[in-house]
Image: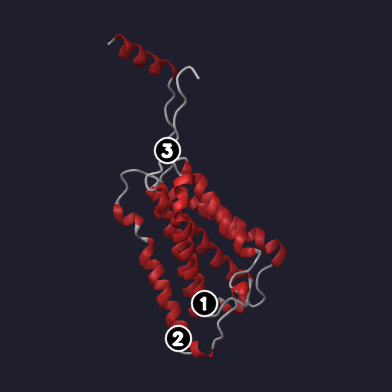
């Protein structure tokens, strides 16, 4: 009992209260602002696409871009929800209907002339500059935020942050380049992002892990 009383006295004297994280929605908004900042940074050397004023009048292009952004944001929200114990289960799956609907819209936009579209070469699947900057940067921003919380499900957290970063990159690419609009190409990009997220998901056990406290007296 004496040791327990001593431990309680020591914790009350030396312990500091844990800093409460902002609500998931505010954390998501902060991540979105940082990701959009990366997109703006990418435009400093590429600029925006020349026909942007024209494509924004097309309903199909706006729908595809809107779903790309919504999927990225919802995947980011799901990843953040996994880092908060006790969150509701539907929050962790909310991105999936958006991604499926995005693929459906891409199919409806491109299935009529899919036979006439050539399969793009892998080297031209993504912009070699914009996509890495936006996707990796967005994923790192999200990972830094999630590491401050609890690593409840590291594998799924890792997969979702990669999908969120990839979705942001697809959205940003099409704001900058005018040669990445083919629905077949975008569909392949989405599938590639999901597959990459699944392949690299086990790395979450390294990136997200419980941090051990320092031993007393060390």
- Mark positioned earlier in the residue sequence (2 or 3): 2
Q: Check the image and report above or below for 150 versus 136.
A: above
Q: Compared to 190, does 198 lie above or below?
A: above
What's the residue at 30%, 44% (across, down)?
Answer: 86
Q: Where does residue 14 sit, x and y in percent of width and height? A: 44, 18
Q: Which is more foreground, mark 2 or mark 1?
A: 2
Q: Nearer the viewer, mark 1 or mark 3?
A: 3
* Residue 210 - label: 3
Residue 151, image x and y in percent?
41, 43
Name the residue rendered at 61%, 61% in the picture: 132
Q: Pointers 2 and 3 in contact (CB under 8 A)?
A: no
Secondary structure at badge 2 equals: loop
Label of residue 174 in the image: none
* Residue indicated by mark 2: 111
Q: Is residue 92 left or right of residue 31?
A: left
Residue shown at 44% from the left, 56% from the top: 159
Tell me the CA gap for discs 1 and 3: 43 Å
Mark 2 vs mark 1, CA separation in Å: 15 Å
Q: Earlier in the sequence, mark 1 or mark 3?
A: 1
């Amino acid at each position: 009992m004496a040791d327990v009383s001593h431990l309680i006295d020591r914790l009350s004297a030396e312990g500091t209260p844990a800093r409460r994280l902002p609500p998931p929605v505010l954390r998501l908004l902060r991540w979105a602002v940082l990701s959009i900042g990366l997109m703006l940074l990418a435009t400093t050397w590429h600029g925006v696409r020349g026909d942007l004023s024209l494509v924004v009048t097309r309903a199909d292009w706006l729908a595809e871009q809107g779903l790309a952004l919504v999927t990225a944001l919802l995947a980011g929200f799901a990843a953040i929800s996994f880092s908060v114990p006790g969150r509701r289960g539907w929050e962790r799956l909310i991105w999936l209907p958006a991604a499926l609907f995005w693929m459906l819209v891409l199919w409806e936009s491109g299935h009529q002339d899919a036979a006439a579209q050539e399969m793009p070469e892998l080297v031209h699947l993504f912009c070699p500059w914009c996509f890495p900057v936006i996707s990796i940067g967005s994923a790192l921003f999200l990972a830094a935020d999630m590491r401050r919380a609890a690593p409840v499900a590291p594998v799924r957290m890792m997969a979702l942050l990669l999908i969120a970063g990839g979705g942001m990159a697809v959205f940003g690419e099409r704001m900058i380049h005018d040669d990445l609009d083919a629905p077949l190409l975008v569909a392949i990009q989405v599938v590639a992002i999901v597959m990459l997220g699944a392949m690299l998901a086990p790395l979450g056990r390294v990136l997200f892990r419980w941090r051990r406290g320092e031993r007393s007296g060390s």
